[in-house]
């Protein structure tokens, strides 16, 4: 069974955790807020730990040393990038995926080998394409 560690249990992290669990993964979730557990539903079969994802002892308790994948989706880019680097470099996890809201920072770290997902860039690209796909009247040139 594949094992995933999800850091951050907001809308994104909880949805990923639920989806992977449904697909048969063994999932552990870490969040600073105990109330975030409610996002996983009443019958969450996985482990949920309360604490900060930068706490190496907590990461060990969460099973990072046996994880096949780590997803970092807290609400802070700096936090996400640090945890992602710790997972990659200190624990040797090959599949580390980090949410980064700042497109320039996401590109910077992606160019250095980190798997980054930038919802801001995705939104910009998608919205721009949606506008281009609209059938708009061709502007006419006004004559004076």
Image (spheres, rainbow, N blue to C red):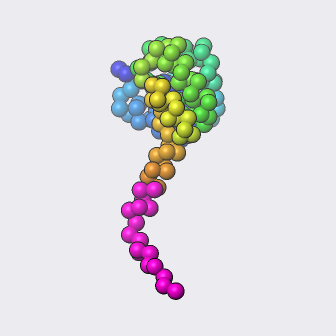
Left or right of 125? Residue 32 is right
Which quadrant of the structure image shows residue 50? top right
The spot of residue 92 in percent (x, y) is: 46, 14
| 140 up-or-down from 36: above or below | below
The spot of residue 91 in percent (x, y) is: 50, 13
Task: Confirm whether residue 39 shows in the render.
Answer: no
The residue sitting at the bottom extreme is 144
| 48 up-or-down from 100: above or below | above
Left or right of 84? Residue 32 is right
The spot of residue 98 in percent (x, y) is: 50, 31
Q: How many numbered callouts?
A: 0
Residue 3 is covered by the magenta coloring:
no
Task: Confirm whether residue 86 shows in the render.
Answer: yes
Left or right of 58? Residue 23 is left
Q: Main secondary structure of the magenta part?
A: loop
Residue at 44% in and 75% down: 139
The residue sitting at the front extreme is 144
Q: Nearer the viewer, residue 107 or 114?
A: 107
Left or right of 1? Residue 73 is right
Which quadrant of the structure image shows residue 74? top right
Which residues fall within the magenta stretch?
128-144
Residue 142 is covered by the magenta coloring:
yes
Which quadrant of the structure image shows residue 36? top right
Residue at 53% in and 24% down: 84
Residue at 44% in and 61% down: 131
Q: Quadrant of the N terminus?
A: top left
Residue at 49% in and 50% down: 124
Q: Nearer the viewer, residue 31 or 73?
A: 73
């Amino acid at each position: 069974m594949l094992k995933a560690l999800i850091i951050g249990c907001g809308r994104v992290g909880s949805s990923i955790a639920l989806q992977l669990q449904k697909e048969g993964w063994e999932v552990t979730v870490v969040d600073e807020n105990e109330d975030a557990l409610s996002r996983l539903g009443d019958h969450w079969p996985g482990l949920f730990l309360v604490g900060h994802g930068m706490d190496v002892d907590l990461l060990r308790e969460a099973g990072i040393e046996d994880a096949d994948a780590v997803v970092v989706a807290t609400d802070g880019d700096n936090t996400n990038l640090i945890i992602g680097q710790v997972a990659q470099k200190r624990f040797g996890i090959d599949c580390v995926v980090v949410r980064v809201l700042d497109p320039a920072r996401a590109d910077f770290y992606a160019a250095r080998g980190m798997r980054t997902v930038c919802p801001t860039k995705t939104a910009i690209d998608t919205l721009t394409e949606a506008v281009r796909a609209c059938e708009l009247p061709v502007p006419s040139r006004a004559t004076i």
